[in-house]
Amino acid sequence: MSDFFSEKLIPQLETNHIGKNIVYLEETDSTNALAKREKNYPCGTVFVAGRQTDGRGRSGRVWQSNDENALYMSILIKPDISPQKISSITLVFGLAVFNALRGYADIGIKWPNDIILDNKKLAGILCEMSGNEEKIDYVVCGVGVNVNNTSFHDEIKDIATSLRIQTGKGYEITEIAAEILNEFDILYAEFLNKGLDDILIKYKNNCITLQKDVKVIMNNTETDAYALDITSEGGLLVRIDKEEKVIVSGEASIRGSIGYA
């Protein structure tokens, strides 16, 4: 199965750095956990699984991933940037996933890391860093995309969707994977060479969170807010009770005032 997946994926890659090494397992706990265990692999190594037994999203939430109808993929990178810029990586990867999927359906980005289709989650992103305040050892960029799923568990069926549910068509998962890797290869190189500015403009143009009422969920408490902008470091600028506050990726969740997005 591993050779079969790689043989189908590799010819579709147009990358310079990302995806030169591919590790495929039929089953693992999560591709992010696998990538962290194999942190000594070269920068750009891609980890893919047919199924995950312990898939996780942000804040430890479960990601339904016990079948082979979705894409479960993580990329190991080792950027020479300040740890304070780690939030930027989430936006770069989020835009890459958006660019890869926009040709399949009318989607948007929910800050900082969800791809939304028909007000439901189509894909989720989880970027995790290892390092200290002075140096990044490595970053794992993980993504789960609901591709050919036809149903979801009761607890998420109202907030999750798939390309197949929305379009009525089935898709080749290696094609989705290749498009994400190709897009990330371009944007990651741009980020390292030129910074976030141009990428952030494109991200904001496709972010459905901005200029609307939202709920900020922090420490199990919901607060009404208005999403104003995204800062140059990738934080979400919101207005709460006439005061402005920057929400950093990872410290809170954002929901629409009505519904998930």
Image (spheres, rainbow, N blue to C red):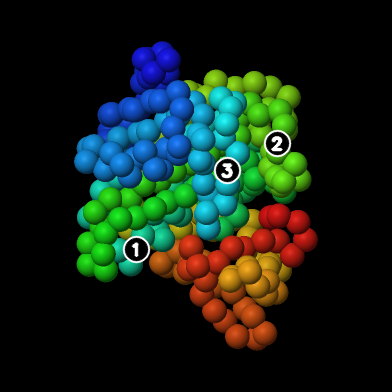
Quick one: 61 or 196, which is closer to the camera? 61
Residue type marked 2: Phe
Instruction: Answer with mark 3 or mark 1, whichever residue precedes in sequence.
Output: 3
Gap between marks 3 and 1, in whole Å? 26 Å
Gap between marks 2 and 3, in whole Å? 11 Å
- Kindly state the secondary structure of the residue where label 3 is placed: loop
In this view, 192 is above or below 247: above
Q: Is residue 148 visible?
A: yes
Residue 152's mark?
Answer: 2
Residue type marked 3: Trp
Residue at the image point whose x is 42% and y is 51% from the top? 127
For disc 2, the neighbor class at 10 Å (few under 14, some 14 to 19, many from 20) is some
- Kindly state the secondary structure of the residue where label 1 is placed: helix
Q: Are marks 3 and 1 in contact (CB under 8 Å)?
A: no
Q: Position of residue 230 (x, y in %)?
A: 51, 66
Residue at the image point whose x is 34% and y is 28% from the top? 23
The image quarter in which residue 32 lies: top left
Instruction: Answer with mark 2 or mark 3, whichever residue precedes in sequence.
Output: 3
The image quarter in which residue 223 lies: bottom right
Instruction: Answer with mark 1 or mark 2, whichever residue precedes in sequence.
Output: 1
Residue type marked 1: Lys
Q: Is residue 194 left or right of residue 244?
A: left
Residue 85's mark?
Answer: 1
The image quarter in which residue 134 lies: bottom left
In this view, 57 is above or below 168: below
Residue on which disc 3 sits: 63
